[in-house]
Image (spheres, helix red, strand yellow):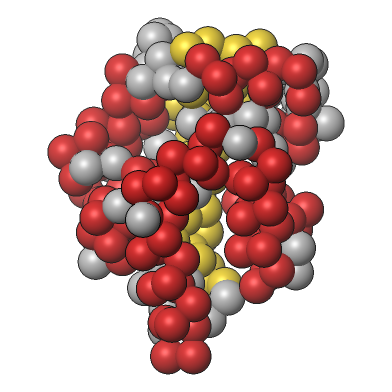
Amino acid sequence: MATILRDWSYRYQWLYDGISRLAALSVGGEVRFRQLALQGLTIHSDSQVLDLCCGSGQTTEFLVKTSQNVTGLDASPKSLQRARLNVPEASYIEAFAEEIPFADNLFDVVHTSVALHEMQPQQLRKIINEVYRVLKPGGVFTLVDFHAPTNPIFWPGVSVFLLLFETETAWELLKTDLAELLAKTGFKVSKSTLYAGGSLQVIQANK
């Protein structure tokens, strides 16, 4: 059942959007959710920004309001097709996050939103290493993703959501200390904030 619902959520945009809006209510709505990882960042019009695993451009549309050099990367041709329609101001490339096809020290900001929980542990480490490689010295990696709830009231809702729409990799992320993993890669974590009873985490880390 989880596989079917998961497949449908990616196949049908209206279902994905509905699920996203429902899940985002816990932090005050989708607009606020999409900007959680961007809070406090200084992004200039000439900043080089990579929206990693950009999906259909849900956060890309906020990034292009501050920078004229936003690139969306995703492995799904269908998602990229939607992103190009939704946010034509950005440029896009089809690629895997663990093999980012860009030069070293290129980006000022790399952003990713609820994508890391899709990855196997080995993939996750490769992605973090790749992000570190393509960021300029002093550049920022900013992300939002699942976290094990610190408030027990949120556990039932998170559990049902993961059972219906996610795979075992999401459960694995709940047991992973992302901040520690980033630090071991060489990042300096500058911000680590929990939302929605601890079920969402926002991390900003500098190279």
Image x and y of residue 109, in percent: 56, 32
Image x and y of residue 203, in percent: 48, 56
Along the horizontal axis of the image, is 9 left or right of 81? left
Looking at the figure, which quarter contains the C terminus? top left
Vertical order, 82 against 173 (above or below): above
Residue, x 42% and y 90% (percent of image)? 152
Along the horizontal axis of the image, is 108 left or right of 17? left
Vertical order, 183 against 66 (above or below): below
Residue, x 46% and y 66% (percent of image)? 161
The reply to whether residue 140 is in sight is no
Residue, x 41% and y 15% (percent of image)? 95
Vertical order, 133 against 155 (above or below): above
Q: How many marks?
A: 0
In this view of the protein, which residue sits in the foreground, 189 or 12? 12
Judged from this view, the residue extending furthest toward the bottom is 152
Looking at the figure, which quarter contains the N terminus? bottom left
Image x and y of residue 90, in percent: 71, 17
- Find residue 127 and report its image quarter: top left
Along the horizontal axis of the image, is 50 left or right of 35? left
Judged from this view, the residue extending furthest toward the left is 122
- Find residue 2 and report its image quarter: bottom left
Image x and y of residue 11, in percent: 54, 33
Along the horizontal axis of the image, is 158 left or right of 45? left
In this view of the protein, which residue sits in the foreground, 89 or 80? 80
- Find residue 170 and report its image quarter: bottom left
In this view of the protein, which residue sits in the foreground, 206 or 22? 22
Vertical order, 90 against 131 (above or below): above
The reply to whether residue 18 is in sight is yes
